[in-house]
Image: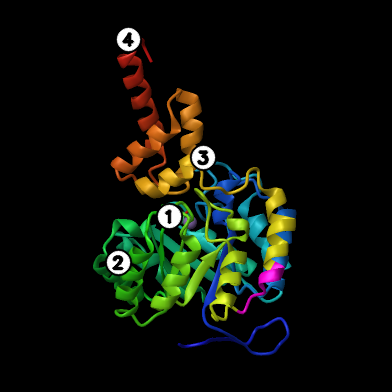
């Protein structure tokens, strides 16, 4: 096992870590609070994560830079202000952003780099690594760490993902990530993908897990066992769908398994309880809708959009989610949620002999 040595520890002493923990409470968590983070909340979360030894903290709209829009939902506070607040609040942790080509722009990347951000995750659907080349190269020119992030990884085979990972590596990605965006993968499916990819690339691999099948922690540990050396979490699991891998639980389970995360589980538990849970409009649970995402393989951030469409068009949210799964809709196709809801409403009306 290769230890990751972090010399930027809060105490100035060398911390040997078995993997790098990236926390996405302030990016993926944004989906779960409809992108309503305030600067004070960002500062409180950053301070807690930083003090607990988390190495990288991701901050942006849930859909990444430039995500604040009619399609994805408007942020309460301009993300540049949130990023700046995060950079000012951190002592040791790096601040990262996520950028989806086509949503975020290179201009925005330059702006956050100038604010002090030094890590960018460039996120694309798991068959579309070829559209990251320009963004990865520009991130490298800007002196940033570039992480290629393959979303909805359950929709590609282990061999297919390896080909995509090789493309990312070839463009200059420093790290490759696979995201179980729908929380749809079993532990064996994660193991197979990680084993295949780590055997075929020379840069580190990371795994971003969601909780829709209640497997986020188990899948993250399995990913580590197969060779992933970056794992994602969010405080109290705050995130899209039924939530992400809870950072504090991951840290606790790692300790029990003798895996050195380099972060303090007790401080992360305090953060989750005292800072993150109080700001959550609802706690992350695997209820029917959350579970359906994992069961049907639907992108986690569709959850609240589907809930609103269900209310607006008077059709069950479960039907919308199942139909989105059947159609294999992917991230970026949020407009399809409305299409599906309207179609279902029409079908119900026809079946009941009324007009929709
Ligand atoms: C485009 C943002 C998206 O939510 C990325 C992510 O966290 C995932 O695919 O799970
Ligand atoms: Mn996610």
Sooner in the amino-acid sequence: mark 1 or mark 3: 1
Above or below: residue 3 compared with residue 77: below
Please identify, in this view, whether the residue under mark 3 or under mark 4 is nearer the observer. 4
Between the residue at mark 2 and the residue at mark 4, the CA separation in whole angstroms equals 47 Å
Secondary structure of the residue carrying tag 4 is loop
Q: Secondary structure at mark 2?
A: helix
Q: Which mark is residue 353?
A: 4
Q: How is the image coloured?
A: rainbow
Q: Secondary structure at mark 1?
A: loop
- Mark with earlier residue (1, 2): 2
Q: Are marks 3 and 4 in contact (CB under 8 Å)?
A: no
Residue 86 in view, yes or no:
yes
- The residue at which mark 1 appears reads as 183
Above or below 328: residue 235: below
Q: CA distance from mark 3 to mark 4?
A: 30 Å
Disc 1 versus disc 2: distance between alpha carbons?
A: 17 Å
Residue range highlighted in magenta: 262-267
The residue mark sitting in front, 2 or 4, is 4
Of pointers 3 and 4, the one earlier in the residue sequence: 3
Q: Quarter of the image holding residue 193?
A: bottom left
In the rendered structure, the answer to whether residue 319 lies left or right of residue 73 reads left
Is 133 in the magenta? no
- Graded by Cα atoms within 10 Å as few (under 14), some (14 to 19) or many (20 or more), the crowding at tag 4 reads few
| Label 2 close to label 4 by CB (< 8 Å) | no
Point 70% across, 70% down: residue: 266
Relative placement, left or right, of 201 versus 247 is left
User: How busy is the neighbourhood of tag 3: few (under 14 within 10 Å), some, or many (20 plus)?
Assistant: some
Q: Which mark is residue 304?
A: 3
Mark 2 vs 4, N-terminal side = 2
- Closer to us: 226 or 125: 226
Q: CA distance from mark 1 to mark 3?
A: 16 Å
Residue with the mark numbered 2:
161
């Amino acid at each position: 096992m290769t230890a990751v040595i972090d010399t930027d520890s809060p105490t100035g002493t060398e911390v040997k870590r078995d993997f790098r923990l990236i926390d996405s409470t302030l990016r993926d968590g944004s989906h779960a609070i409809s992108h309503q983070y305030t600067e004070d909340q960002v500062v409180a979360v950053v301070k807690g994560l930083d003090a607990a030894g988390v190495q990288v903290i991701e901050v942006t709209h849930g859909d990444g830079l430039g995500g604040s829009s009619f399609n994805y939902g408007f942020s309460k506070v301009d993300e540049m202000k949130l990023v700046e607040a995060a950079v000012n609040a951190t002592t040791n942790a790096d601040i990262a952003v996520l950028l989806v080509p086509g949503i975020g722009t290179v201009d925005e990347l330059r702006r956050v780099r100038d604010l002090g951000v030094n890590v960018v995750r460039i996120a694309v659907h798991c068959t579309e690594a070829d559209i990251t080349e320009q963004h990865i190269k520009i991130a490298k020119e800007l002196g940033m760490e570039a992480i290629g992030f393959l979303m909805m990884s359950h929709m590609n085979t282990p061999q297919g993902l390896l080909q995509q990972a090789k493309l990312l590596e070839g463009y200059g990605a420093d790290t490759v990530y696979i995201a179980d965006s729908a929380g749809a993968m079993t532990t064996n499916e994660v193991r197979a993908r990680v084993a295949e990819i780590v055997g075929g690339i020379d840069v580190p691999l990371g795994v971003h897990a969601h909780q829709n099948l209640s497997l986020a922690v188990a899948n993250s540990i399995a990913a580590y066992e197969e060779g992933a050396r970056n794992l994602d979490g969010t405080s109290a699991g705050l995130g899209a769908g039924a939530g992400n891998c809870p950072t504090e639980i991951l840290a606790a389970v790692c300790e029990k398994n003798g895996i050195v995360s380099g972060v303090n589980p007790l401080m992360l538990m305090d953060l989750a309880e005292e800072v993150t849970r109080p700001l959550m409009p609802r706690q992350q649970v695997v209820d029917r809708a959350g579970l359906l995402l994992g069961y049907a393989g639907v992108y986690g951030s569709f959850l609240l959009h589907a809930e609103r469409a269900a209310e607006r068009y008077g059709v069950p949210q479960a039907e919308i989610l199942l139909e989105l799964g059947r159609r294999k809709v992917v991230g970026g196709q949020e407009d399809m949620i409305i299409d599906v809801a309207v179609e279902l409403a029409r079908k119900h009306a026809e079946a009941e002999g009324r007009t929709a």
